[in-house]
Image (cartoon, coloured by chain):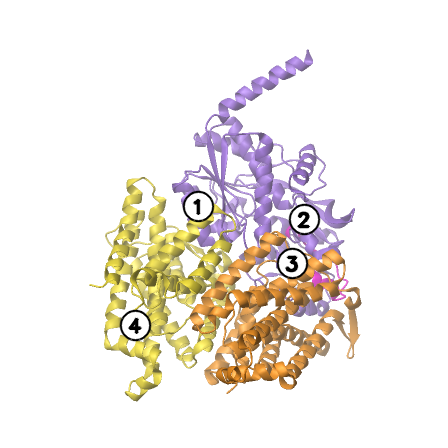
Chain colours: A orange, B purple, C yellow
Amino acid sequence: MTFALFAEQLLNGLQFGVTLFLMAAGLTLIFGVMGLINLAHGSLYMVGAFACAAVAAWTGSFWLGLVASLAAAAGAGALVELLVIRRLYDRDHLDQVLATFALILIFSEAMRWLFGPFPLYLDMPALLQGAIILPGGIEYPLYRLAIIVIGIAVAIGLHLLIARTRIGMRIRAGSSDREMIAALGVDIGKLYTIVFALGAALAGFAGALVGVNQSVQVGMGEPVLILAFVVIVIGGIGSLRGALIGALLVGVIDTMGRFLLPQAFMLVMEPSAAATTGASLASMLIYVVMALILAFRPRGLFAPA
Amino acid sequence: MKKILAAALFGCAMMAANAAFADPVKIGMITTLSGGGAGLGVDVRDGFMLALKQSGNKDVTVIIKDDAQKPELAVQIADEMIQSDKVQILTGIIWSNLAMAVVPNAVGQDIFYLSPNAGPSALAGAKCNKNYFNVAWQNDNLHEAMGSYASEAGYKKTFILAPNYPAGTDALTGFKRFYKGELAGELFTKIGQTDYAAEIAQIRASGADSVFFFLPGGMGIAFMKQYAQSGIKIPVMGPGFSFDQDVLGAIGDAAIGVKNSSQWSKDLDNAANKKFVESFQAEYGRLPSLYASQGFDTANLILSALAKAKVTDADAFRAALKAADFATVRGKFKFGNNNHPIQDIYVREVVKDAGTLTNKIIGVAFKDHQDAYASQCKM
Amino acid sequence: MTREFWINGVLALLLLAAPFIALAFGESFYVTLATRVAILALAAVGLNLALGLGGLVSFGHAAFFGIGGYAAGLLAAEGLASMPLIWLVGAVVAGLVALATGAVSLRTSGVYFIMITLAFAQMIYYFVISWPTLGGEDGLSLALRNEFPFVNTLKPLNFFLIAYGLLLLALFVFARLRASRFGAALEGARQNETRLASLGIEVFPVRLWAFVLSAMITSVAGALYADLNRFVSPSMLSWHMSGELIVIVLLGGVGRLFGPVAGAAVFVLLEFALGGLTERWQLFLGLILLGTVLFARGGLLALFAGKARHG
């Protein structure tokens, strides 16, 4: 194993972590402010990817598609919040789980109704195509580097939004004391709709970015949804910093596990068996890590007080 | 005079056909019409129903139900179709794990099962059954063809990967069965995985001269897109599943030039196929896929057997199925001892034809190929 | 006698009568459907113990359901085809797994508990799907239905009666437990943890044992499910299955004795009826579930029998 390969895998882990962060940020924001557990977050991710693919195919411009993904996911989020989610804030988590589970079924079939059963085509803009050579001789896809940069930019942007702006102040107030903020004369219903739409837009944005690299199809949000939950639970639900660190941790551990475990088994087993055994354990690895972290810190690494 | 004679002959043929068709026949189709894998089920169904429509046969009713790719649901639907709807023939299942759940039990109850897609090794070998006919392929076949092609193309160090589940391990076993070079690496990925950066990095570092992968559905689309942008120039090959009409559009130009194996192709030169491709396009407004061709062949096989024998006369009907006396879109088709196909398998290349991505045949990997499990079948 | 008591009685009799009526009309398929209802209801009774009485929202009960199923598949492959033995082995293994995972999970609460139970179930799911000897995604087939002393289990009606009998037994255990000191402690812990602690009752062991017992009941249902379908597959362990079990409990009514029975009946019939009507049945299933949560709080039994007396 060369240093270049090891470094490339670390970069891959980082990039995977950053995409998970885009999903997890919205999820943790929504939970932090409204106390809502939203299984349908993966569906909003799917909506973003489909909107991007459809608009990009129609106009020929990926960038317009990206804008469309933000608009469609935010719009779908706001609509769902007004029609359904709004009635769930004062319910227990059980009702929220069931209602948003139902939303997954509805979204999936609705998308299939609209776009048909076949995967959609979505390609990256010409600007970001190809690979570049990094210092140390690592050849790395430009698009993946772009995702890392975008993800970090979004993290900084969200931090500034929450720490420095009026709406951010209200969001912070909303997550620490709900009665207080209502007493201050803030329209809490509107605030909640905005926060939910913001979280949805982040998910849709992630869906569009990842859709370029993957397959835009019904059900694409579910695997990443579960990973995003793992991320926010490790990081501490409601904490943006926790979501970022949890996402990077999960991204790097998962990637390195897939890479290193089969090689480790190769030292003691014949290649085919090592490949299957290593792959089996690698697929369980992040859940083991999550269980270990929660065993020692039951509220995650950075749970807000 | 000729015309009259032809008309008379035609009339006789119709009467003979009517005599055999007289009994109503019920076919149950269990297939995947919802969720991420729906595209395959839709194609099988559309191909099947097109053949039925063209036949004009009014005595056949088809009951279609969605299994949502859940094995438990497929079993429940099979029970319902057998016990409640009293179907005589079942077909439609796309996935091997669902076939393993449904088929042994259905054929045990003297129901005929014709597989339009899945061909798990157990059903071809030790668990073969006289009432189970596979009209597609045994699961290993297309991978074996690619293994044979890789050797012929002179590849010496191939990197192979597949998801870590039975069809995946079977795929790599099938490839290795006919591949003579050495392996640059062998990897099993997580099922449903969508990010292949780690695997692609390993391929790059392995010094391979070619890559063989089996990643069905969305997994393959994701892999191909990410592989194309990684800048690696090592040639890729795979079974036809990853490069057929249902997914090519989603992969895009990244697929151009990729070699893949299939028992069917849109440009196969025979009359039945030309008519099939044309009429499928006219009926549904899209190009048919491998799966559609298999659905179409399955229906025509059933119709050909029904023209010869009543389904209630199980022995005669079974013999009529086994004769495989129908105009297949593959050009030729016959069954081996284990009721699995003995057929040619082609090597295709993905090309862009008038703006649409599609496949064209560039060679033959196997002539009259039979699966490796036939000898284990005591039938 | 309360109204709920009579409704429960009617439900129990209806489920028992359904297969006999079906057979009288020669529709043997409905016996299978009724068996499916009984088995899913049994699994949900197990979940209801943790979720309804204890307030422990486990999003990972599919793991225990699947453990029972794989016990049936693996033991049958070894030639140990006796149902009671399979149930015992499945329940012991599921109980031990629940003891270990519960000991970690119960240190958390709220959303963390939901998610950590999900994570443990996913761990088991990925283990089973990728470990070669467990049959991977294909699962394991059962050549014949497993045996029960003095009963021909191959007859659908007999198999239904076995499942139904176990369901009644589990309901009896649930009812007795709810009325016991243990049940009172469990419900007390759900409603007011600090008050219970001030009474000198330790909450953790009460919850842990409830979780273990809940897992054991669900695993027996899993073993029956494997026998009903004549195979086991990893989809029994998937998070969708966990979700469906929660849906069943909620549809019927959380914490109610017969909630799981009503929920399972409605869920199976909906899946069956909608699946026959349209290929977009999942859309309508979603809409119906959503409607139930939003407008029929407390589940179906609350609609007919009024709000639960504890809750």
- Report crowding for label 2: few under 14, some 14 to 19, many 20 or more residues within 10 A (C-alpha): many
- Report crowding for label 3: few under 14, some 14 to 19, many 20 or more residues within 10 A (C-alpha): many
Residue at 34% over, 86% down = C194
Q: Quadrant of the C terminus of chain C?
A: bottom left
CB under 8 Å between callouts 2 and 4?
A: no
What distance separates the C-alpha of mark 1 from that of mark 3?
Answer: 30 Å
**Type of amino acid at the residue the image marks with label 2:** Gln
Q: Is residue A305 left or right of residue B10?
A: left
Q: Which mark is residue A133?
A: none
- Report crowding for label 1: few under 14, some 14 to 19, many 20 or more residues within 10 A (C-alpha): many
Q: Is residue B305 left or right of residue B264?
A: left
Percent x, y of residue A58: 73, 56
> Does C266 sit above or below residue A223?
above
Q: Residue furthest front?
A: A185
What distance separates the C-alpha of mark 3 from that of mark 4?
Answer: 52 Å
In the image, the segment drawn in magenta is B223-241
Residue corresponding to mark 4: C310
Quarter of the view holding residue A17? bottom right
Task: Specify whether residue B59 is in view.
Answer: yes
CB under 8 Å between callouts 4 and 1?
A: no
> Does C300 sit above or below residue A20?
above
Q: Quadrant of the N terminus of chain C?
A: bottom left
Residue corresponding to mark 1: B78
The chain holding disc 2 is B
From the viewer's perspective, is the residue at label 2 or at label 4 nearer?
4
What distance separates the C-alpha of mark 4 from that of mark 1?
Answer: 43 Å
Q: Is residue C1 left or right of residue C222?
A: left
The chain holding disc 3 is B
Same chain under badges 1 and 3? The reply is yes
Residue corresponding to mark 3: B220
